[in-house]
Amino acid sequence: MNKYLQSCAITIASIASISGTAAIAAGESGEYVNEIAPNVYSYSPGNGYHSMFVVTEEGVAVFETVNSQHSTSMLEAINGITDQPVVYGFQTHNHWDHASGGAVLQSAGAETVMHRQAAEWLEANPGRDTSPPDIVWSGDRHDIELGGVTIEHHYLGLNHGLGMTVFVVPELEVAYIGDLVTPNRVMFNIVPDFNIGEWERSLGEILELNFETAVCSHSELPAGEVENGCTKEHVAEERAYIQDLRGAIFAEFEKGTPASEIPTSIELPQYAHWAHYDDWLAMNAQRVLLDLWMGPYPWVPAETAE
C-alpha cells in the first residue's frame, strides 16, 4: 500500500472510531441533565454532544440543536423540568452535526437563531436534517433579551467553520462553546475546517468573556465531571496544546528532522492522558505542519466574514 493510500486508510479508520467512542460513552454514561448554575442546565442524551438550556419566566433558550433525535430527547428533558415553552434555539455554526435538528424546536414553536455566514452556507449546502433559521444576524455582536437575562452572541471572526458564535449569559456567568474547546482531548482527527492561528487567537478572546462556567459541545471529562461543563481553565489548556504542538514541530526542524518524519516524531507527554493522543497526535502534527508550509487555511476576505 503506498503512503497516500495508507494515510487515507488511517484517516477512515480513525473517523470510524469516533462512532465507536460515542457508542461506548453512551453506554457508560447515558443521558443526563445537570443544573450548572441557577436555572441553567447542561444536557446530553449520551451521544458525545452536549447542549445547554436556560429556563426563564418568559421561556426557555436552548443552545445547540445537534440533530432531530438529540433535540427530541432534549425537549423531553426540558418538559420534565419546566412548563415554560422553548422560545429560542441557538446554533453555533454551519456544520451539519451541530446545525441539524432545528425543525424539532421550530415545530414546538421556537425560533432558531444563526449567524449570516452559517445560514448562507446551509442554504447552499442543506443537510438531510437541517432547516432554515428563523433569525439571522450579522456582524460580530448581537444580543437577545429573554426573561431578565441577556443572551450575548459573540462572533469572534474566522476560526472554525462559518459563523462560529460563542454565547454568553453574563447575568448568570455562563457560556456555550461549540467545537473550539474540547476538554481532555487532542485536536479532532485531521483538524478539519480549522484556521489554527485564528482558532488560537479566538481562544484568547474567549478567555476575556464574562463567564465562569460553560458547556462545551464535546468533552472527554470523566462521568461525574462532564455534567458540570467546562471552565476557562479548559480554554487555556486548549490554547496551550496548540502552542506546545507548534513548538514541538519547530524543535524538530531545529534538530534537522526531515519534514516527512516530523508528524510521527512528535511527543507531548504532558498530554498523553488526553483522549486520542495515540491515534490523532500525528495527524494533528501533520495538519499544523501543512499550515506552516502552505499558509493558514481556510480563509475568507474580511468583507465577507461578518
Image (cartoon, grey):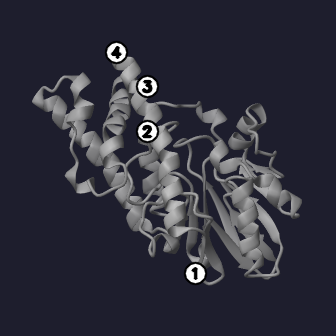
What is the spatial separation of the Cα atoms under label 4 and label 1, in whole angstroms? 53 Å
From the viewer's perspective, is the residue at label 1 or at label 2 nearer? Answer: 2
Among the two numbered marks 3 and 2 on one chain, the one whose residue lies closer to the N terminus: 3
Q: Secondary structure at mark 1?
A: strand
Judge by depth and name the residue closer to the eye, 287 or 155. Answer: 287
From the viewer's perspective, is the residue at label 4 or at label 1 nearer? Answer: 4
What is the spatial separation of the Cα atoms under label 3 and label 4, in whole angstroms? 10 Å
- The amino acid sitting under disc 2 is Ser
Report the residue that reaches farthest toward the left: 255
Camera sees residue 111: no
- Residue at mark 3: 8
Q: Which mark is residue 186?
A: none
- The amino acid sitting under disc 4 is Asn
What is the spatial separation of the Cα atoms under label 3 and label 2, in whole angstroms? 10 Å
Among the two numbered marks 1 and 3 on one chain, the one whose residue lies closer to the N terminus: 3
- The amino acid sitting under disc 1 is Ala
- Residue at mark 1: 37
**Contact, mark 1 vs mark 2 (Cβ under 8 Å):** no
